[in-house]
Amino acid sequence: MTSSFEFHTYPARLSDVERDRVLGVLREGAAQGQLSHDTFLHRMELALAARHSEELRALTADLETGGGGRLSRRLYRAVGRVSAFSVRLRRAWQAEKLPPLLLPEPGPYPLRIGRDPANGLRLSHDTVSRLHAELSQRGALWVLRDLGSTNGTTVNGQRVTGAVVVHHGDMVGFGRMSFRLTER
């Protein structure tokens, strides 16, 4: 009795080495200004979702051609500068729209911040905890301390764990509410 076997050949599964190489090429292309930030993020997502080597090759085909000529490099730099300008402009626009948060008069007790009506600064927002943070003066310095809030406290975009020194002009956030610290 003879039997016939069918052999199915499936495309080889992508290795981590292949994917890492492509991610490195994309990072380098973004660093050299060959990719805008949005294009870089989109291609990174596609690279992480790719199932075949051909998909990865298509993501970097325009980056691995040796950089093109002098005109291509100038064009990439110009697009990078324009893209960077729009990012800086958006950050500046958002920063100027923040409401001010006046530093309190120095006193023996810290300013408690949260949703609870007993706080010195009550913020009625779903992302603010009842007892969210406190602001106190220690000598000549102002210190902001997160009190174990659920959605976090941030200073200049960085999450606060414990206490951090804050200054006039810093951007502070409690959950999704953000303010610009100002002196009286």
Image: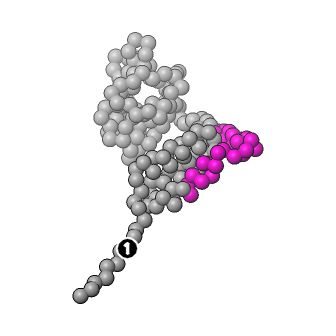
Which residue position is annotated with label 1? 8
The magenta stretch is 58-86
For the point 48% across and 37% down, the residue is 178
| Magenta-drawn stretch, dominant element (helix, strand or loop) | helix
Using the rendered image of the protein, determine whether residue 135 is visible from the camera's viewpoint: no
Q: Nearer the viewer, residue 36 or 87?
A: 36
User: Which amino acid is tagged 1?
Assistant: His
Secondary element type, mark 1: loop
For the point 34% across and 30% down, the residue is 161
In the picture, residue 115 is in which quadrant? Answer: top left
Position above or below: 111 against 26: above
Give the percent coordinates (x, y) of residue 166: 45, 23
Give the percent coordinates (x, y) of residue 4: 31, 82
In the picture, residue 145 is in which quadrant? Answer: top left
Q: Is residue 25 left or right of residue 8?
A: right
Name of the residue lying farthest toward the top: 139
Position above or below: 99 against 168: below
For the point 41% across and 62% down, the residue is 12
CA neighbours of label 1 inside 10 A, class few (<14), some (14 to 19), many (20+): few
Using the rendered image of the protein, determine whether residue 6 is visible from the camera's viewpoint: yes
Q: Nearer the viewer, residue 137 or 160?
A: 160
For the point 48% across and 54% down, the residue is 47
For the N terminus, the quadrant is bottom left
